[in-house]
Image (cartoon, rainbow, N blue to C red):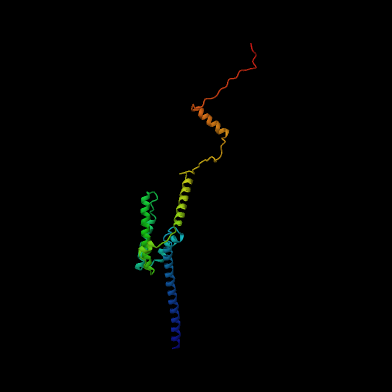
Amino acid sequence: MEILTIIAIIVGLILAIQVQKFLESKREEKERRLRVFKTLMVTRSAVLSPLHVEALNSIDIEFNSTAEEDKYVRNAWKAYLDELVHYPKDGQDDDKKRWAEKIDTLLVELLSVMSKAVGYDFDKTYIKRTAYTPIKYSDIEFEQDFIRRSLVKIFLGVSSIPIKIITPSGTSEISSEEKLRQLLIQHYEGNKPIRVIIEEDKSREKV
């Protein structure tokens, strides 16, 4: 009887440890899923952020169960990713605008189904309208992108650095080379004849 009691105690302890490990594993799994979702939510208006990209690439790892909610998340992520890699870089401005609008819609859809999978219930309008981005951030991002693209064109030989020579104000004197150049231009254009002076040779003896 004592042996059975000891066995029951040991088995009970083992089961308790296993249950504890299982609960810790599920808690850590939930925390990781929440971390991915929260990162995407706080960076949804800064999609170029490394944190945003890292969270997107973690979706397949953290939402990999057979539950319906996780399937919806993976499908939404697949649709979003498929559109992201088809950026119309050679298209017109209207094509790029339509592409940007579409990926915004797909990101909102992804965050909506993900919110339900982690226990929240954010509607699409809330997700789309409540993100705050300072206008200065947009200006900085535009300027950095403009500088980057301009430098790429220069290094590829597509464009050159514009150079403008400006004569300092207040400089009234013209260099002798510049004055000579202007006189020659006026002469060849027929606007200024060459002045010739004929002098008598006084050293020659009179006959």
Q: Residue furthest top?
A: 207
Question: Which sits in the foreground, 154 or 184?
Answer: 184
Question: Which sits in the foreground, 58 or 14?
Answer: 58
Q: Is residue 176 above or below residue 200?
A: below
Residue 77 seen anywhere in this rendered image of the structure: no
Question: Which sits in the foreground, 1 or 93?
Answer: 93
Quarter of the picture holding the N terminus: bottom left
Give residue 120's position: percent from left, percent from top.
Answer: 38, 69
What is the count of numbered marks? 0
Quarter where residue 47 is shown: bottom left
Give residue 206's position: percent from left, percent from top.
Answer: 64, 12
Quarter where residue 110 is shown: bottom left
Question: Which sits in the foreground, 96 or 18?
Answer: 96
Quarter where residue 65 is shown: bottom left
Residue displayed at 46% across by 46% down: 153
Residue displayed at 45% across by 80% down: 13
Q: Is residue 11 above or below residue 154?
A: below
Give residue 116's position: percent from left, percent from top.
Answer: 36, 68
Residue displayed at 36% across by 50% down: 94
Give residue 15's position: percent from left, percent from top.
Answer: 43, 79
Residue 5 seen anywhere in this rendered image of the structure: yes
Quarter of the picture holding the C terminus: top right
